[in-house]
Amino acid sequence: MDRLVFRLLFWLLALVLAVVIIVFSVSNRGSIEIDLWLYQTPPLPVFAVVLLAVFVGFIWGGLAAWASAGRTRARVRDLARRVEAEQREKAILRHRLNKLEAAEKQAAIPPPPSSAAEAA
C-alpha cells in the first residue's frame, strides 16, 4: 500500500514539474546571446539557458553529495567486513562449544559395571 502511495506521489510531482517546465518554456521564448571568451554562440532561448543551468547545478550537486558521502560508504564497507568476520568467529566458537558439550556428556556417563561386581 505504501509503495502505491509513493508511486502515485512521484508521478503527481513529476506531472506538476513537467507542467511548470512547459509553462516556463513557453513564457520565456525570447532569445539571448551568451558571450563566451573564446566562442561565439548563436542566440539561445532564455528557457534553454535557464533549464541547462538548473540541470548542470542538479548534476553538480549530486556529484558533490556523492563525493562527500565517500567516507561514510567506506566506513559501511569496513563495518560490513567486520560483521562478517565476527559472524564467522561466532560460528566457529559455537561449533567448538557443541563439541565440548558433547564430550562433557560422554564423560558424565558412568562407566558400565564390571562383570566382577555383578558376580558378587
Image (tube, rainbow, N blue to C red):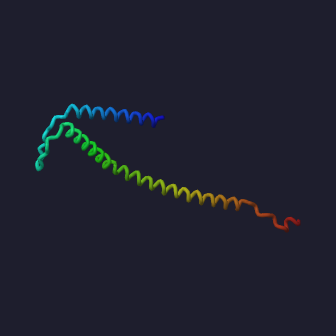
Q: Position of residue 80 (x, y in %)?
A: 44, 53
Could you tell whether 93 is left or right of 79 in the image? right
Q: Residue furthest right?
A: 120
Q: Residue at x 30, y 32 (%)?
A: 19
Q: Residue at x 37, y 33 (%)?
A: 12
Q: Residue at x 65, y 58 (%)?
A: 101
Q: Locate residue 17: give its quadrant.
A: top left
**In this view of the protein, which residue sits in the foreground, 72 or 94?**
72
**In this view of the protein, which residue sits in the foreground, 23 or 38?**
23
**In this view of the protein, which residue sits in the foreground, 14 or 95?**
14
Residue 30 against residue 74 in the figure, above or below: above
How many tags in the picture?
A: 0
Q: Position of residue 50 (x, y in %)?
A: 21, 38
Could you tell whether 72 is left or right of 34 in the image? right
Q: Position of residue 65 (x, y in %)?
A: 31, 45
Q: Position of residue 49 (x, y in %)?
A: 19, 40
Q: Residue at x 28, y 32 (%)?
A: 20
Q: Residue furthest bottom?
A: 116
